[in-house]
Amino acid sequence: LVLAKLGLPYKLVLCDILKGETRTPEFLAKNPNGRIPTLQLEDGTFLAESGAIIWYLAEGTPLAPKDRKARAETLQWMFFEQYSHEPNIAVARFWKHYLPKLSALQEMDLPNRMKGGYAALDVMEKHLAKNDFFIGGSFGLADIALYAYTHVAPEGEFDLSKYPGINAWMGRVVAQPDPVRQAGELVEEGQVMDAVLGLALGRDVAADLDHPEAGRAIRQIEAIGSSDEAARSHRRPRR
């Protein structure tokens, strides 16, 4: 979504994490942690971790605040997404939406994931009841980071109907000038958001997006499934 919003040209490559495609020597040479997303820059170097990637892309643009406090608050919400939101909502979604059957450990841990997911949604709802967006009253990186898994939370059987603030906010995100539509031009119908967000689709997709104003940073993204979800799905239940 950051790439689409900024009109940057790139190549998107999706591979199947369930086949171990992020654990091959070729991929590990790019990211020794074997995780996605992994971003290849123009100079041939690689950058990992989604928060670092979108911050790199947005640096110097309106998506990343210039004000010191606003920047810190953006990072605060991005850390919240990584530590309180994604480990619960994204994992529950992955288990329920992609796996044919849960293991005994996953079944045991699922109530904790659901409880944690709803707790994160409650925090978001409280903030969005008083604010149109997460930082400074305008659309930015914090909104992109939290929109990613929030808008697909129902696929993890999270009920968003009781969150009017979140639903209104998601409507405002979608109403932003063309970020979702531009991203959707990359892939066939039915693959749009999963491909852009780098989720496991079980197939390979490659597409190019050119924009006359694009002039920096990206030539290739290796967006390979959602290995963070897969890795967390094998953790022991929290006690």
Image (cartoon, grey):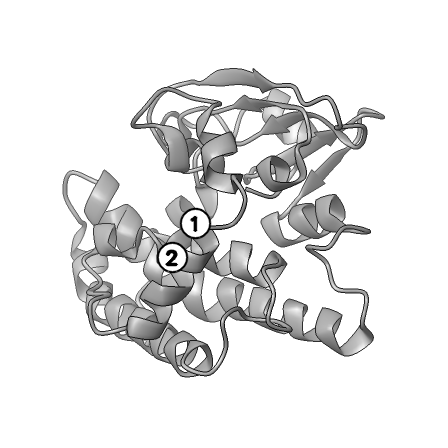
Rendering coords of residue 89 (x, y %) = 34, 60
Q: Is residue 173 above or below residue 220?
A: below
Rendering coords of residue 5 (x, y %) = 60, 41
Q: Report whether 9 appears left or right of 42.
A: left
Determine contact: label 1, label 2, CB under 8 Å. Answer: yes
In the rendered image, which quarter is residue 171 located in? bottom left
The answer to whether residue 238 is seen in the rendering is: no
Label 2: which secondary element = helix
Question: Where does the N terminus fall, quadrant-wise?
Answer: top right
**In the rendered structure, which amino acid carries the disc numbered 1?**
Val
Q: Report whether 237 appears left or right of 141.
A: left
Rendering coords of residue 178 (x, y %) = 51, 39
Q: Residue at x 74, y 69 (%)?
A: 71
Label 1: which secondary element = helix
In the rendered image, which quarter is residue 51 located in? bottom right
The answer to whether residue 161 is seen in the rendering is: yes
User: Which residue corresponds to mark 2?
Assistant: 171
**In the rendered structure, which amino acid carries the disc numbered 2?**
Gly
User: Is 166 in front, or is 232?
Assistant: 166
Q: Residue at x 81, y 65 (%)?
A: 66
In the rendered image, which quarter is residue 159 located in? bottom left
Q: Residue at x 29, y 67 (%)?
A: 113
User: Which residue corresponds to mark 1?
Assistant: 174
